[in-house]
């Protein structure tokens, strides 16, 4: 290549470099002006991070709410299932109880005719027991009278079954029957010679009912034939006193000589 051509080419290249440098230095903005500020970039990145964190917090909160709702729904469903099981069991129990009520009602209806016969019989039994007490020796009169009154009151009570009323009547008969097989001593009040006196009373079954004043000065017995108290002579004082001690378990049992029904001649 000729030297003048080489010089022209080199000059053109240099001119191009100079033009490029001038354009960079004198263009719309310098290189420093077009380079982004580092602080601004950091701020923008920080804002983007904060925004992302806030978004994630919202997502997390929504997730927590959803989980809570799911748990509440599951718990409510389980409670509903338990309630259904309980209701089914309750319905079974109610049906069973109703069947029992129906069975009892049938028994009551069947027993109705029997009850109509039993109730009048119980009234008769109470009247008979009352007559026995009235004709018997006069011992424990208040206790025995109260028992009869209680039996009569029971007949008007709706809270007692017929069977319970009957049981109490039979129990009263058993108590009265036991009086004929035991011995008893207690303190009571008698009218003696027109005056009320505190006395010891001795009952030996239904064979003898005797009294003795607390000072042992007077002794007597109930005369069934005359239905009154009769004084005994002093020969019976020790026997009645021993009988009182035996009844109170203060003395070993022994044979006693006491007045019997024929004792009406012992005045």
Image (cartoon, rainbow, N blue to C red):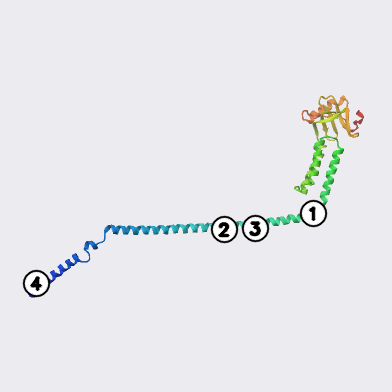
**Which numbered disc, 4 or 1, marks the residue that appears first in the sequence?**
4
User: In the image, which disc is placed on residue 7?
Assistant: 4
**Which numbered disc, 3 or 4, marks the residue that appears first in the sequence?**
4
Tag nearer the camera, 2 or 3: 2
Q: Is residue 169 visible?
A: no
Question: Circles 4 and 2: CB distance less than 8 Å?
Answer: no
The residue where tag 1 is placed is: 112
Query: What's the distance in space between the residues labelled 4 and 2, CA to CA?
Result: 101 Å
**Which numbered disc, 3 or 1, marks the residue that appears first in the sequence?**
3
User: In the image, which disc is placed on residue 100?
Assistant: none
User: In the image, which disc is placed on residue 80?
Assistant: 2
Tag nearer the camera, 4 or 2: 4
Quadrant of residue 39 in the image? bottom left
Query: What's the distance in space between the residues labelled 3 and 4, CA to CA?
Result: 117 Å
Q: Which residue: 91% across, 31% down?
A: 264
Query: What's the distance in space between the residues labelled 1 and 2, CA to CA?
Result: 47 Å
């Amino acid at each position: 290549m000729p030297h003048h051509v080489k010089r022209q080419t080199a000059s053109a290249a240099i001119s191009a470099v100079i033009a490029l440098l001038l354009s960079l230095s004198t263009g719309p903005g310098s290189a420093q002006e077009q380079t982004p500020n580092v602080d601004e970039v950091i701020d923008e990145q920080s804002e983007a991070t904060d925004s992302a964190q806030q978004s994630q917090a919202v997502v997390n909160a929504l997730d927590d709410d959803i989980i809570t709702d799911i748990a509440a729904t599951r718990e409510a469903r389980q409670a509903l299932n338990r309630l259904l099981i309980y209701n089914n069991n309750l319905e079974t129990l109610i049906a069973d109880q109703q069947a029992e009520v129906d069975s009892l009602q049938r028994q009551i209806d069947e027993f109705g005719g029997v009850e109509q016969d039993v109730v009048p019989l119980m009234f008769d039994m109470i009247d008979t027991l009352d007559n026995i007490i009235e004709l018997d020796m006069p011992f424990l009169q208040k206790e025995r009278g109260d028992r009869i009154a209680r039996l009569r009151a029971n007949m008007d009570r709706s809270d007692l079954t017929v069977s319970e009323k009957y049981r109490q009547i039979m129990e009263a008969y058993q108590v009265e029957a036991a009086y004929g097989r035991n011995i008893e001593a207690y303190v009571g009040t008698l009218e003696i010679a027109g005056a009320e006196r505190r006395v010891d009373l001795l009952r030996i079954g239904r064979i003898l009912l005797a009294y003795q004043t607390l000072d042992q000065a007077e002794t007597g017995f109930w005369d069934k034939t005359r239905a009154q108290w009769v004084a005994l002579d002093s020969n019976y004082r020790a026997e009645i006193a021993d009988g009182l001690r035996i009844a109170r378990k203060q003395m070993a049992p022994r044979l006693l000589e006491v007045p019997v029904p024929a004792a009406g001649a012992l005045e």
